[in-house]
Amino acid sequence: MSAINLSIELLRTFITVIEVASFTRAAEILYRTQPAISLQIKRLEEAVGYSLIERNGKKISLTERGEALATHARQILRLNDLAIAELEQRDPAAILRVGLPVDYAVNALQTCLVDVIRKFPDTKIEIRCDLSKHLLAALRSNEIDIAVALFDGDDQQFLFRNWKEQPNWVGANSFEILDNTDIPLVAHPYGCVYRDRMASALKLAGKSWRIAYSSPGIDGVQRAVQDGLGLSCLTAPTVKGGMRIFSEQHGLPILAPLHIGLFTRQTRLGSCGYAAIDAIVSTLEKYCTNADYA
């Protein structure tokens, strides 16, 4: 089989269509007509010999081959854009907007970006800390360029890298689960992945529960657990002194794994953006000590 040389132009069109989930919107971003975008996707599919994108009305989704190519296409575009930026000695992104999750590793991720800020003084880096679901919504509405977020594992739009980690039931050393009473939970606000994991697991197990304490920040959740206000769902690196892990031996159901994703808008990233991605990936690889790459 002869070697296939993939066109940067076709790959950029492919990634843009994925990111905006629309052929029409991709045409507007790339200053082309919608038929031209469709033709480029067809040419790419013909080049690789596989269907990459499935259309169902106005909705689009990636085939299995499309998902595989998307991972490599992002890397190819990254190297291409970095090379051009270095040759021209310019960075296409004067502003970089980064979203960090208050419900996962926010302190470690925030710290890792400090060096990036120092290395790129000409780029204005704006950091937004919020719940994962709000960050993903902001990414889709083009309010941020990079986001680290917990997600359900099925959301592939803008996904650059992802990890999987097993959370734990955690309570104070002195906390005891009482019979015939609602289990008090310490949680983030409604819509948080941790909260959903706890509620779903307890519901399936037929156990009643109540929210005893709610806080948008991890520090508040940790302190409430240490104070014995209830059980919570935490990953190993966030378990602090004065806490112990609870399990099936204590009558609790197993929690579903967490999916941690690094999401990017490929069309907006310059050398500063890619440096931020490298810093985030390095931090998450160290932070997720018990995580499996997904």
Image (tube, helix red, strand yellow):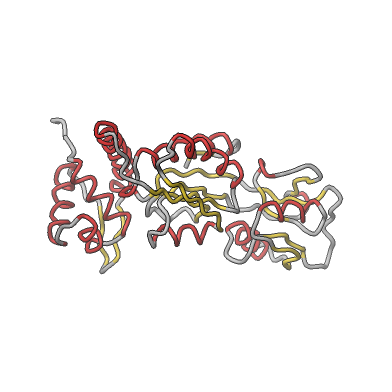
Q: How many marks?
A: 0
Pinpoint residue 277: horizontal percent, then vertical percent: 43, 40
Query: Which of 272/264 is in front?
Result: 272
Residue at horizontal 17 percent and vertical 56 percent from the top: 37
**Residue 230 spot, x, y in % from top left:** 78, 58
Q: Nearer the viewer, residue 149 or 201?
A: 149
93 left or right, relative to 35: right
Q: Quadrant of the N terminus?
A: top left
Q: Is residue 232 left or right of residue 149?
A: right
- Which residue occupies the foreground of this view, 241 or 96? 96
Q: Residue at point 55% right, 43% down?
A: 109
In the image, residue 278 sits, relative to residue 218, either above or below, namely: above
Q: Residue at x 82, y 58 (%)?
A: 177
Residue 254 screen position, x and y as percent:
65, 52
143 is higher (above) or lower (below) than 267? below
Q: Is residue 177 left or right of residue 47?
A: right
Residue placed at 27% from the left, 53% from the top? 16
| Residue 120 percent across, percent down from the top left | 42, 37
Residue 81 appears left or right of 7: right
- Residue 49, above or below 54: above
Residue placed furthest toward the front: 122
Q: Residue furthest right?
A: 174
Q: Nearer the viewer, residue 122 or 78?
A: 122
